[in-house]
Structures are given as structure tokens and as C-alpha cells.
Amino acid sequence: MKKSLLVLLAIVFAISLNTKAEDFSAVFNGDTIYYKITSNVSPYTVAVTFRGETYLSYLNEYIDSVSIPDSVHYNGNYYRVTAIGDSAFLFCTGLRSINIPNSVTSIGNQAFNTIWGLHSINIPNSVTSIGDSAFAICTFLESVTIPNSVTHIGAACFLGCHGLYSITIPESVKRINPSTFESCLHLTTVNLPDSLTSIGEFAFYNSMYIDNITIPSSVTSIGAYAFDNTIFYIHQPNGLAYFNNVLYNYKGSMPQNTSITVQDGTVSISGNAFKGCSGLTSIHIPNSVNYIGDSAFWDCSGLTSITCDAPIPPVIGNLNCFENVNDTVPVYFPCSALSLYQQDSKWSYFTNFLCDPLSINEIQTNNVSTKLYPNPSKGKSKLEIKGLNSEADVLIYDMVGRVIQKHKVNQNTKELEIDLRSSDKGVYFVRIVNNSIKHTKKLIVQ
């Protein structure tokens, strides 16, 4: 027993002797800088690190200003300083200025986190990556220029930088990660590049003074709450909030028995877009949508019908996208896609797949537009028709593709009453057709 204890203590002691973050230190301009060797063969490289076993070992190691050399001599070799390591200057609250050399290509996670005295930072154009929370809680940071060399800005990188008034994201950046500029309380001007493709959840959340932001058309996904609690979002009207081709969310309180058709051309539905919308009874997703974010329909307990026109099932962010939605809700989809929906790990949550015999997303021609109301209905609805310039047939199909009613309309027809009270409850399709028009709407009878 004693022998085992001695062995255990010896192991713990040995580990404690080898858990220091630094491999060596060297003095530069009066400051002792600590280094971790990242390559011990030519070309020799090091990362700047913190002193001791953890970043809490020596708080406030640096005061006022610090300069980092581009190379350091150790054991007969010159090591190039290529990185600021994780937590290297974390909690150095007394620092006011930092000089980063052009040799540095990456800034690690939390590298400069919680440096309250830092007012500006010059990131050299050698840097390609800035880690998670690298400058978070630098409360008084007022000025930062992100060079075009940077391709990655980590999550929460500038979270809580209250002093920032403006930020320009370079063209080299394709994604803004979650919480990158969350709670930057004085941020008013944000310039986003045309190269941007996605904006992560909470990206600008609670940066309340952002009152105008241009979201590039290149952006195809926006995370949940990315713009919530900003003047920009507050000024959006209630109802469906679209940012270009992204359905961001439903803003405000949704009325009961709401049926929503997502507009054509929408490419993604943001996370939490309809979270808690118990008044939502049916959703129609066009074939342009290829991504649905986390928890988009979480707790939409009133859903009775889902229609998705996409021949390839849209990617779903996570399994609780339809949390608290009845798994027996009918899901309508193109007939050719049955096996794809059944085999998809997320869509297979549902057990009631129904084949849609018609394309209900056909291109409108001759400027014809229609509106069905009420929809869903108790059996009686009206079809409003605009732009019809010649005679046409109105065909009513059931779910197996049978024509159950046929009507004639012409250019003078403004409205047609459709009575399905004698038919079963379910989904029907109303098609206007002639030599130049094929125009279809879905009608739900409850």
C-alpha cells in the first residue's frame, strides 16, 4: 500500500515538474517573455505563452506595454516567433499597449482576453487566424484593424468590447462565428464583405446601437439571435423577417391558426426561427431551401401539416429541430424523394410521409397571381385571381392526383368559390391551367 502511494506521489510530482506552459524565457526590451517551442527542427519556431502551470499562476505578469520580438535565441538556435499562444496575456489587466511582430501568423484562444487597459491593437498583415475569445472583455478597446490576411476570426473574439465603435471585416473572411461581436455596446458601424457566406448565432447580439447593416447577398445562413437586441432588428416589422434569401425568424407574437408559405428563393431558415410558435398550423417550404437551423420549429406544437418541395431533403441543424412537434404530422414532399426523406437521420423523426402528386412551386406565367383564403379552411374557400388574360381551367386534385372538381374561368373572373365541405379533411391542390399557364396552390381542409 505504501509502495503504491509512493509510486503515485512520484508520478504526480513528475507530472507537476513538466506541466509548465513555457519551455524557456528571454528578456526583450526589459520584459521577460515566455515561449513554448512549436518546432525543434529547422525552421525553428516558438509561440508566446504564459508563465507557470496555468494562466492563473501569475496574474498581471505585464504592466503598461509589452513588445514581442520576431525571433529569440535559445540553446544556440534562433527561433522565429510565429504565434501568440492560448491565454498568453489573459487577465493582464494592466497592459495598455502590445506590439505584435510581422512574424506572427496566429493569435490563440483567449490570447488577450480581459485586458481592460487596452485601447487599440495593431494586428500585422502576417496574421491569418485569430482564435476564440482572443480579445473578449477588452472593455475599453476602441480601435482594431483586421488585415486582409486574416481568414478566420474565432467565436466570441470581440465579445464585450464595449469601446468599439466601428468594425470592418476584410474580404478574406467567409464566416462570422458565434458571438464574435456580441455585447459590443457602442458598436454602430459594421462593414461586411461580399465574400461573406454565413453569420453565426449571437454574432451581433446585444450590440444595441447597430442601427443599419448591409447584409451581402452572398450570405446563405444566419444563426439564431445573430441580430437580436439591436436597433437594426428592433426596426424590422413584425411577422416574417427575411434578410436577403435567409428567413431569419418570425418577429413578434404569432396569431393562432397561422399558415405560412416561405417565399420562393429562400435558401435557409435560421435556427430558432419559429421556436415556441404554437400558433403555427402549417408550413410550406419551397424547393430552394437547403438548410434548416437548430431548433427552428422547436415547440411548434400546433403544427398539423408540413410541406417541403425540395427533391433533396434540406439539411437540418440538429435533432431537436422539431422538438415537441407530433411525429405523426403529415409531411408532404415530391413523390420521387420518398426514400431520401425516410432515410434521412433528421427527417425520419416523422412517421407520416405523404407523396405530393403535383409540383406546387411552379413558375407563374403571364403575370398571373392567385390567393386562396381562408387557408386552411373548414371546406369553403375563395380563389382570388389576378392577371388572367384568357380562358383557363381550374382543377381541384386530391392527394393521389385525382381531379375531383373542374371549373372554367376567364379574364373577367376575379374570384372563384371552392366548396369542399363534402370532401374528406386533408390537403388538396388547386391548379389553373391553359396553353400558357400552369399555376398551382395548396389548399388545406381541416
Image (cartoon, rainbow, N blue to C red):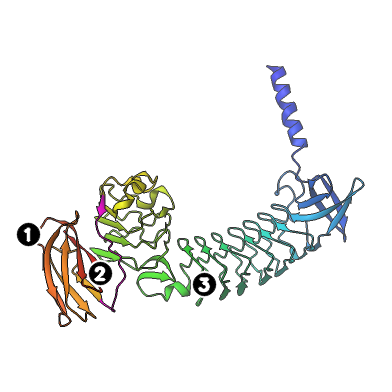
> In the image, which disc is placed on residue 438?
2
In this rendering, would 98 be left or right of 359? right
100 up-or-down from 10: above or below: below
| Rendering coords of residue 98 (x, y %) | 76, 64
Quadrant location, the N terminus: top right
In this rendering, would 155 be left or right of 42? left
> In the image, which disc is placed on residue 287?
none
Q: Earlier in the sequence, mark 2 or mark 3?
A: 3
* 363 in magenta: yes
**Residue type pointed to by label 3:** Pro
Specify start and end residues of the magenta stretch as a single range.
Answer: 354-368
Task: Residue 107: name its quadrant.
Answer: bottom right
Judging depth in this view, the residue of 114 and 191 nearest the camera is: 191
User: Which residue does the numbered mark 3 point to in the structure image?
Assistant: 216
- Name the residue: 30% across, 51% down: 325
| Rendering coords of residue 374 (x, y %) | 18, 69
Quadrant location, the C terminus: bottom left
The 10 Å Cα crowd at callout 1, few under 14, some 14 to 19, many 20 or more, is few
Classify mark 1: helix, strand or loop. loop
| Residues at marks 1 and 3 touching, judged by CB atoms closer than 8 Å | no
| Disc 1/disc 3 C-alpha distance (Å) | 50 Å
Q: Could one spot residue 175 in this view of the protein?
A: yes
- Name the residue: 77% across, 52% down: 47
